[in-house]
Amino acid sequence: MLGGIGAYIASEISGAVRRNVIVYALMGFAVLLVLCAGGYALSALHTVLALRYGTAEASLFIAAGLFVAALIAFGAALYVKNRRRPARPVAATALVAAPLIAKLVGSGVKSRTGWRIALVGGVVVLGALLGRQFFTGGDDDDEA
């Protein structure tokens, strides 16, 4: 019984992971294409500016534009870094699951059936904790 549930959970997780890998690979390829298109657009802009103002001035205009874009990106990064983070989903899930765990542990796990119920309840709670953390994209490596 528990082996079938474990296999089902493993297949669901592997399906979700496989889907996420495909999505992120396609997004990465799209970003690469956008970067290539941006490079060609800058080259075309340089050519137009070089015909109108000269090659040195065209290069200076492109460099100044890239510098301003870098400053804007740096400012946006600082703004996002200093924003207050929302509450962590694992903490919220743990608070919701705490009464269920207390009920399962305190409800007489002296019999064989009680241990099974406690084990299944623990697996369900652990699955909820890991699932919320995995699918909401929680990060544990940055400061609060």
Image: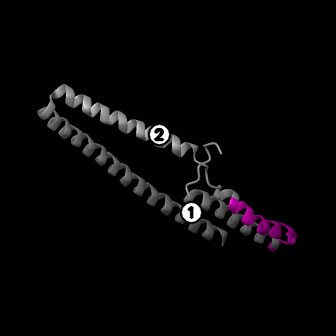
> Which residue is at a point 52% across and 44% down the rendered structure image?
79
Asked if residue 103 lies in the magenta stretch, the reply is yes
> Which residue is at a point 66% across and 57% down the rendered structure image?
90
Question: Which residue in the structure is indicated by mark 2?
Answer: 75
Numbered range of the magenta stretch: 92-113
Q: Nearer the viewer, residue 64 or 104?
A: 64
Q: Left of 93 or right of it: where is 113?
A: right
Q: In which quarter of the image is the N terminus?
A: bottom right
Q: Is the residue marked by circle 1 packed among few (<14), some (14-19), or many (20+) residues within 10 Å?
A: few
* Earlier sequence position, callout 1 versus callout 2: 1
Rendered view: 23 above or below 1 = above
Q: Left of 142 or right of it: where is 111?
A: right
Please state the horizontal and vertical placement of residue 59, each as a whole percent of the image. 23, 29
Rendered view: 17 above or below 81 = below
Q: Left of 80 or right of it: where is 32?
A: left
Question: Which residue in the structure is indicated by mark 1?
Answer: 10
CA gap between label 1 and label 2 equals: 42 Å
Q: Nearer the viewer, residue 99 or 116?
A: 99
Q: In which quarter of the image is residue 112?
A: bottom right
Label 1 SS = helix
Please state the horizontal and vertical placement of residue 2, each as a whole percent of the image. 66, 69
> Which residue is at a point 15% across and 38% down the rendered structure image?
48
Please state the horizontal and vertical placement of residue 120, each as a whole percent of the image. 72, 69
Asked if residue 139 lies in the magenta stretch, the reply is no
Q: Left of 110 or right of it: where is 20?
A: left
The amino acid sitting under disc 1 is Ala
Q: Which of 127 and 65 is in front in this view?
A: 65
Label 2 SS = helix
Q: Quadrant of the C terminus?
A: top right
